[in-house]
Image (cartoon, rainbow, N blue to C red):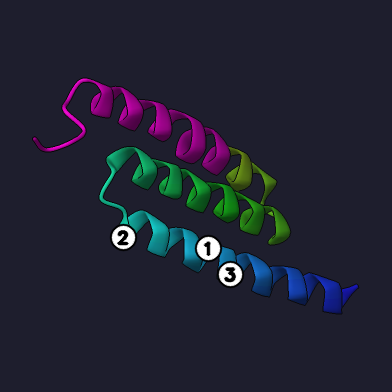
Amino acid sequence: MIVALTIMVYVLAVILIIAALFAVKQKDLLLAVIGTSAISVVLSIFFYILQAPDVALTEAAIGVALSTIIFVITIKKTERYEE
């Protein structure tokens, strides 16, 4: 059980790093927002593994839902591409 949990933590850490690099390297702002929401999903899973379900739910609600909606609305009101 402990070995499976350790492997899961390492896999999630690798996914977190990949998502962070994806969010930073993107030229398209909408894809960068998707990358940051993926980071929030992985962090909420980490918090749940660390036995902090209240923090995990808050991260999922604020980090994934609310922040993503605010960023998408803001991007929609601006121009996405340079001409």
Q: Rate crowding at label 3 as few (under 14), some (14 to 19) or many (20 or more) other CA atoms within 10 Å.
A: some
User: Which amino acid, mark 3?
Assistant: Ala
Label 2 vs 1, first from the N-terminus: 1
In this rendering, position of residue 1 left or right of residue 38: right
Residue shown at the point (46%, 40%) measured from the top left = 63
Question: Disc 3 to disc 2, how far (Cα)?
Answer: 18 Å
Give the image location of residue 76, x and y in percent: 27, 23
Q: Is residue 44 left or right of residue 74?
A: right
Closer to us: 12 or 76: 76
Q: Residues within 10 Å of mark 2 (few under 14, many from 20)?
A: few
Front residue of this view, candidates 37 and 31: 31
Within the magenta stretch, is there residue 76? yes
**Disc number for residue 13:** 3
Magenta residues (range): 58-83
Mark 2 belongs to which amino acid? Answer: Lys
Nearer the observer: mark 2 or 1; the answer is 2
Q: Quadrant of residue 73?
A: top left
In the rendered view, tell whether residue 8 sits above or below residue 37: below
The reply to whether the C-beta atoms of the residues labelled 3 and 2 are less than 8 Å apart is no
